[in-house]
Image (tube, rainbow, N blue to C red):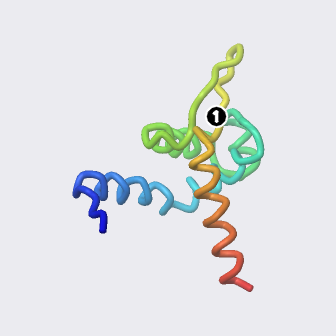
């Protein structure tokens, strides 16, 4: 039996906490389709740019999203396939439960 360190499990706990906010999940959901800038995310979700920026800061600091600057705009996207898989399986699981 493998027992993980307290530090690793604490990090995992903090990682999952970031998924506990509906606005952050909505942002991640729209970013599954393609990279977007703040104003595009704001328009899709009908949430202020300020609120989107605040949540993107949290998502970036947790390494769930990454940025790419193109011209004057900063585009946000899902950081890697691990995050996409976590979201995909979570959505599938909840969809099954809701049936």
Give me the residue at 68% from left, 54% from top.
29
- Figure check: 24 above or below 49: below
Q: Read off the residue under disc 1.
A: 76
Q: Position of residue 69 (x, y in %)?
A: 64, 20
Residue sticking out furthest to the left: 6
In-front residue for pair 68/37: 68
Task: Judge the density around disc 1: few (<14), some (14-19), many (≥20) Cα neighbours within 10 Å.
Answer: many
- In the displayed structure, 61 sits above or below 10; it is above
Give the residue furthest to the top: 71
Q: Determine the residue positioned at 35% across, 59% down.
A: 13
Quarter-wise, where is residue 41 in the image?
Answer: top right
x and y percentages locating residue 62 in the rendered image: 44, 43
Tell me the quarter of the image containing the C terminus. Answer: bottom right
Residue at the outermost front position: 1
What residue is drawn where x is 24% and y is 52%?
7
Above or below: residue 87 compared with residue 52:
below
Position of residue 60 measured from the top left corner of the image (x, y, whole percent): 49, 37
Determine whether, in the image, residue 50 is placed left or right of residue 75.
left
How many discs mark residues in the rendered view?
1
1 sits left or right of 47 in the view: left
Specify the quadrant of the image occupied by residue 79: top right
Q: Classify residue 38 by image quadrant.
A: top right
Task: Judge left or right: residue 89 versus residue 21.
Answer: right
Residue 68, how many percent across, how many down?
63, 24
Secondary structure found at label 1: strand
Residue depicted at x 61% and y 66% = 90
In which quadrant of the rendered image does the N terminus lie?
bottom left
Residue 19 lies left or right of residue 87; in this view the side is left
């Amino acid at each position: 039996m493998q027992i993980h360190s307290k530090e690793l499990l604490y990090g995992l706990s903090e990682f999952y906490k970031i998924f506990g906010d509906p606005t952050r999940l909505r942002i991640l959901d729209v970013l599954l389709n393609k990279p977007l800038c703040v104003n595009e995310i704001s328009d899709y979700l009908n949430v202020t740019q300020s609120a989107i920026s605040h949540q993107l800061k949290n998502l970036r600091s947790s390494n769930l999203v990454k940025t790419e600057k193109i011209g004057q705009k900063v585009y946000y996207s899902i950081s890697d396939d691990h995050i996409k898989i976590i979201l995909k399986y979570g959505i599938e699981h909840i969809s099954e439960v809701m049936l």
